[in-house]
């Protein structure tokens, strides 16, 4: 839930530290990750951290001998009918699970629909439904010294790779350059948005049609994390 105590914040990390931790061309990225100084006590402060997700991929490779997408293909991608998915590899050959995935909009829609159905696809329960409740819940507050964002959609809480949104009953997978997979829990609806402008900023028209403009929620009351039991 990105509360490891360090991450992408240039207000508390010098540029050289950030470059060493998140340089995708760095051969010793795992060493740099493990030797990085904690800026906050682990578990106390939300701080976005792509390298932490990459480390999970390294652990998967060490445990199974398979890269992330190699592991997921027979277990998830093939059952969902997702094809020709690519993932950027780090210099040591480990796939960069925190970023760098390439897939068609239709396949992104399949995955987000699968998430909205709590792991069920074509009548089969492929993953534990309770896990999706946890993954999409507000597990940790995103209001922190390292995430002082003005946009309320960045302040509603974070689950397991999913962001909570305003209004209530909405959460999203949020990628670079305006790539969103949004779940409207109370409307049985998903929204896929996959465009960004030349400057790398998302086109917000469709997003705002679904959510309303950020200013519409200026007085929003942000929820506290929900403590959920983990097996």
Image: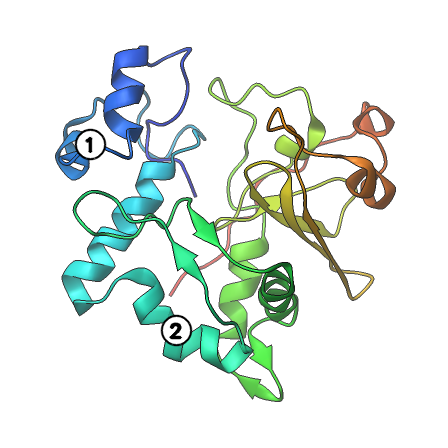
Q: Is residue 1 in sight in this rendering? A: yes
Q: Is residue 127 in sight in this rendering? A: no
> What colour scheme governs how the chains and residues are painted in the rendered image of this protein?
rainbow
The structure residue drawn at horizontal position 52% and vertical position 72%, both measured from the top left corner, is: 82
The structure residue drawn at horizontal position 14% and vertical position 28%, both measured from the top left corner, is: 35
Q: In the drawing, does residue 202 fall left or right of residue 93? A: right
Can you give x and y, in whole percent of width and height, for residue 197 in the image?
67, 31
Residue occupied by mark 2: 73
Can you give x and y, in whole percent of width and height, for residue 229 in the image?
45, 59
The structure residue drawn at horizontal position 54% and vertical position 34%, both measured from the top left corner, is: 141
- Asked if 12 appears above or below 191 in the picture, the reply is above
Q: Quadrant of the C terminus?
A: bottom left
Give the structural element (helix, strand or loop) at label 2.
helix
Q: In the drawing, does residue 103 fall left or right of residue 193? A: left
The structure residue drawn at horizontal position 74% and vertical position 34%, both measured from the top left corner, is: 203
Q: In the drawing, does residue 91 fall left or right of residue 137? A: left
């Amino acid at each position: 839930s990105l509360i490891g105590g360090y991450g992408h914040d240039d207000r508390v990390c010098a540029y050289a530290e950030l470059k060493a931790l998140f340089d995708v061309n760095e051969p010793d990225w795992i060493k740099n990750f493990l030797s990085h100084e904690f800026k906050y006590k682990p578990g106390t402060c939300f701080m976005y951290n792509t390298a932490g997700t990459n480390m999970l991929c390294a652990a998967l490779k060490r445990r199974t001998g398979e890269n992330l997408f190699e592991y997921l293909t027979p277990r998830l991608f093939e059952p969902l009918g997702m094809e020709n998915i690519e993932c950027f590899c780090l210099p040591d050959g480990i796939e960069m699970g925190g970023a760098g995935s390439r897939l068609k909009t239709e396949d992104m829609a399949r995955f987000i629909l699968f998430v909205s159905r709590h792991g069920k696809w074509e009548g089969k329960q492929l993953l534990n439904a309770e896990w999706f409740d946890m993954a999409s819940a507000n597990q940790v507050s995103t209001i922190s010294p390292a995430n002082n964002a003005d946009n309320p959609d960045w302040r509603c809480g974070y689950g397991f790779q999913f962001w909570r949104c305003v209004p209530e009953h909405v959460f999203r997978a949020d990628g670079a350059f305006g790539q969103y997979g949004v779940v409207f829990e109370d409307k049985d609806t998903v929204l896929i948005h996959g465009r960004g402008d030349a400057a790398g900023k998302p086109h917000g028209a469709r997003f705002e049609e679904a959510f309303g403009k950020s200013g519409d929620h200026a007085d929003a009351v942000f929820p506290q994390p929900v403590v959920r039991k983990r097996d």
